[in-house]
Image: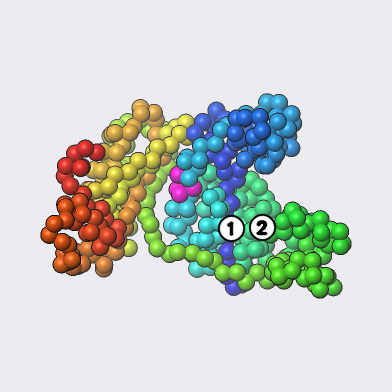
Amino acid sequence: MAGRVIFHIDLNSFFASAEILKNSALEGLPVVVAGLHRRSVVSTASYEARAYGVHSAMPLLIAQEKCPQLVVVKGDYSWYEELSERFFQFMRQFSPYIEPASIDECYMDVTEPILRYKRPLDFAWMIQQRLYEEIGLPCSIGVGPNKFLAKMASDMRKPMGITVLRKHEISRKLWPLPISEMWGIGKKSQPILKEHGIHTICDLADEKNESLILTLLGKHGYTYIQNARGNDTNKLTYNTTVQSISQGTTLDRDVEDYDEIKTVLRRLALSLSQRAKNEDIKGSLISISIRYFDFTNAVRSITIQDYTSDASVLFEHALLLYDRNQNGKAVRHLGIGLGSLFSKTHSIDQMKLSLDDVKGHESIDQVLDHLNKQIPGIHLTTAAKLKKQ
């Protein structure tokens, strides 16, 4: 594929998948996430529920009529946010050029890393499989030369699909689709277009209809026409600043032995330490992620006083977090993370701490607050306050 290569990674029925991760007994059942009152609407439906005609935005009462055995789960949005952060953190290990599109999808420029693969689609397959094995989230991946075509491709095969949509393929794969399936065309625009004979994406791309579409859709019409022709020019919007790094592993079997857990954590700490040193960074937030045999998860963190990339420090605190939070269940996945990062080339040790403008009558808290504002990324406090935590 010439030019840029863009992946669109879309988590499949994200909220439902997240609930199944919390409760594996839901797997294979028709599950919807919705409020528990009569006027609720479906937020997300599992693919088992969709087989009955249930879909998002459908009133819950109608969904229950279509599927009497429907399992309704109240949304746990703090859990979804936590999983979403893990999803984006996972993706950043493959490319720094990532644009989040929503809580459960992103665009990723993989033009350079995909060159390392003899068969380029192996890269997409590896990401898809590892995301499912390490975090438990199924996804579909669309591959294209721009954002629009990648987005359209990811919608073509769900769940767990991988689809390539090249510009020379759009007449065969994209144009026959109804305009209702074109990303960006809203429900208000669809009946207007259909009323004037614009029924397919091919109709939208047709030069004969260009002036009509510009009249009907106004200033947005040109963008839709160009997208339909495969000419999306929107660039990815991303921030390459690394917020955290992590190292994780999925175990070959369910593990309960404490010494084996320690061995895995020590190995992860060594790997994470080496990676931090290679990237010339340190961090003060150490976290662990645990996935148990039943796919329940625990993510815990601790902030330490000094920035570090030392393997022994990472291991000691990871083990402490594990000891405090392990619940006796067999473990299937372990991970260690390092956050609140800074580069050693901009070390705090090199910063001049000036107290010239700190007034003599200011309290300890005011002085600490002044220092915390001067030094981004750290938080100074008193020993007395630490004891209370």
Where residue 140 sits in the image (x, y, percent)?
Answer: 61, 51
Numbered label attached to residue 334: none
Query: Residue shown at 45%/49% (left/top)?
Result: 85
Q: Earlier along the polypeptide chain: callout 1 or callout 2?
A: 1
Residue at the image point whose x is 52% and y is 61% from the top: 99
Residue that mark 1 sits on: 8
Q: Which residue type carries mark 1?
A: His
Q: Which residue has dot 2 on it? A: 153
Decide whether residue 340 is among the magenta residues.
no
Residue 146 visible here? yes
* Looking at the image, residue 52 lies above or below residue 139: above
State the image coordinates of residue 317 (x, y, percent, origin top left): 25, 43
Callout 1: SS? strand
Image quadrant where one finds the N terminus? bottom right
Residues shaded magenta:
82-86
Vertical position of residue 62 compared to residue 311: above or below: above
Q: Residues within 10 Å of mark 1 (few under 14, many from 20)?
A: many
Distance CA(mark 1)–CA(mark 2): 8 Å
The majority secondary structure of the magenta stretch comes to helix
Q: Secondary structure at mark 2?
A: helix
Which quarter of the rendered picture does the C terminus lie within?
top left
Q: Quadrant of residue 146?
A: bottom right
Question: Mark 1 near mark 2, Cβ–Cβ under 8 Å?
Answer: yes
At horizontal 57% and vertical 48% (from top left) the residue drawn is 11
Left or right position of 77 against 332: right
Q: Give how far across and how far down residue 220 sits, in percent.
A: 70, 67
Give 214 or 102, whichever is nearer the viewer. Answer: 214
Q: Amino acid at mark 2?
A: Ala
How many discs mark residues in the rendered view? 2
Foreground of the two, 230 or 71: 71
In percent of width and height, residue 221 lies at: 73, 68
**11 above or below 290?**
below
